[in-house]
Image: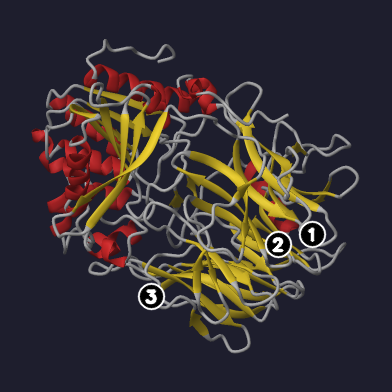
Amino acid sequence: MIESSASPSLFRDLSAFVARPRVNALALSVDGTRLVAAVQSLSGDGTRFVSGLWEIDPAGERDALRLTRSDEGESGPVFGPDGTLYFLSGRAAADGAANGDEDGAAALWALPPRGEASVVARHPGGITSVTVARDSGALCHTAGLLPGAADAKEHGELRAARRDAKVTAILYESGPTRAWDHDLGPAEPHTFVRARAGAEPVVAGGQGTGLEAPGDTALSPDGTRVAYTRFVPGRVPDEHRTAVVVADAVSGEEILVVGDPEHLYEAPRFTHDGSAVVCCRERFPTYDEPYDATLVRIDLADGTVWDLLPGFDNWPGGAACSPLDDTLFFTCDEQGHAPVFRRDPDGGVTRLTASGAYGSLTVAPDGRMLYALRHAVDSPPTPVRIDACVPDQAPAGLPAPGGVGDLPGTLTEVRAEGDDGFVLRGWLVLPEGASAERPAPLLVAVHGGPQSSWNGWTWRWNPWPFAARGYAVLLPDPALSTGYGQVNHRRGWGQWGGRPYTDVIALTDATEARDDVDASRTALAGGSYGGYMANRVATSTDRFKAIVSHAGPWDLRMFQGDTDAPWFWQRIFGDPLTRPERYEAYSPHLDVAKIRTPMLVIHGAKDYRVPVGQGAALFHELQRHHVPAKYLYFPDENHWILRPHHSRLWYETFLNFLDHHVLGADWQRPGLL
């Protein structure tokens, strides 16, 4: 039996909270009878998460059944037309042979409807993603090729030569060079296609070395064509971009490349008949204008590009195409949710879900049902079944691992008015027992991005362990947040520490005005952009009892040259030598002498998005100015603190810091620190 519930004590026991299973991805069989989820669970030694595959009953009548279990884990499930389940794993083969790579990287496995799993493809350095043609069963995977290698064999020989010579150096001839937590290159991700069983994979082109997540590929239903995203380097800072490439799946020859200097193209998906590709198109931001995004259709006959959502005010995510006609399904942030929408062939758009945030959309073969992962601020990801014809529905949940049971509080909304009259909103988590007689201390948690929204469950910045400790938690969506129309981006554009700051303060004021919140005991925290906002707040007001800054930019002039995407950053803030105005107006480090509030600084050494020097410099400056401060430093973590034992320490240190400065409790240093 699956443990489908837990008591509120789960959120008081940080070890138990961190250890809860986490559902990450769904795959539906071609005939619609089988649904499989990738689920992360704690390893035996408790030091890492391991992904396994679980069978989910599409009818919602039976408990989920675990299909795979190995120490290396299994991920990326996808079905072939004959019912074969393909997945990626670094585990050893049944005969005891290793997966063919000295690094233990992932090979492609196949699990038939009956029988044992076996290796289908290996690649030196591993395979990063796989997709299958709906009708023909053609296979496509993404794997790297070193410069000078024409195929996997030559790539393996070059890898061996580098390894034997103890060479790890990389020669870059264009940027970028890093992404989030890893160096890009020296291998370039390539698209490989095996059009029929037993055939050697054909190289269908390189994806470029600038993609943050390579493997964005799709096959036409008949398996004759492949589409993928390619990073195209250009002149810094204006011309790096992405394009969508369509190639012949048998020969590997390019058929069509769609891209232009003004847009990013990504997430290609073939239409039901393979005559067109649907993808996301994002308009590049400029110094004066924010991003914008839509879905477009690329007709393969002549390369014509059509905007499918003209006038749609929010930013759609990747599309799922109906297998029957030109109906599309997509998600986008909207007013603290991320609903599922249906776009009909005539252009009409209908919202299908009333609440929650959705991902991993997959369409049943009859086009009448969808399956997705639903989550919300008060609900972890769980598989659901959605009727494709019913607007604003509450989808039926399907039994799966990862439930958390009753929560230690309730969820409501807060609204306020911006200085320009714009209606602001945010979520408010209230702990059990909060009332006028027992007002709760408040934590204001600012999200990252800043193009983001508090609309779903997160394991990294989850409000419920704070509620279990007695804190109310405000999750504000200020200017630049997604889901409130293009006007909300424009009203905060180019002023990171301006209107977004005043919006956060306005929502804080509205929350503190409640009689069940104690306005005299308030703290503020944030990560990434939220960490920047924490730093900005610290230099702008002393109203908060404590501030926590996780991976936050501190010195914007230094940050823009050291981040992994300086070219993208300079589009927004400008060249600091010729247009220094925004750096001078909004860099927190210039006002360090104004800080009076105790601060906890958190940073990972492998963070390339906001390099660790930002956190180290902030901590040094706090000490120099005699501000009470602590620095929680993770030498082997990145922008996110992901390892389970470190995640527990993150929460424990954070909560103890709040208890000390907000509640007046004695400081409790975590035992392992």
| Residue 154 point in image, percent of width and height | 72, 57
Left or right position of 491 against 162: left
Marked residue nearer the N-terminal end (2 or 3): 3
* Amino acid under disc 3: Glu
Q: Amino acid at mark 1?
A: Gly
What numbered label is drawn on residue 657? none
Q: Which residue is mark 1?
A: 80
Secondary structure type for disc 2: loop
Q: Which residue is mark 3?
A: 262
Q: Please name the residue shown 66% across and 39% down the image.
A: 400
Which secondary structure, mark 1?
Answer: loop
Residue 69 placement: quadrant: top right
Helix, strand or loop at label 3? It is loop
- The residue drawn where x is 21% and y is 31% is 515
Task: State how many labels appear.
Answer: 3
How far apart are the two marked residues, 3 and 1, measured between alpha carbons? 37 Å
For the point 81% across and 69% down, the residue is 136
| Earlier residue among tags 3 and 1 | 1
Tell me the CA gap for discs 2 and 3: 35 Å
**Depth order, front residue of 124/548:** 548
Which scheme is used to colour this image of the protein? Answer: secondary structure
Mark 3 burial class by Cα count in 10 Å: few <14, some 14-19, many 20+: some
Q: Nearer the viewer, mark 3 or mark 1?
A: 1
In the figure, 445 relative to 46: above or below?
below
Callouts 1 and 2 close, C-beta under 8 Å: no
Amino acid beneath label 2: Ala
Q: Is residue 186 visible?
A: no
Residue labelled with disc 2: 364
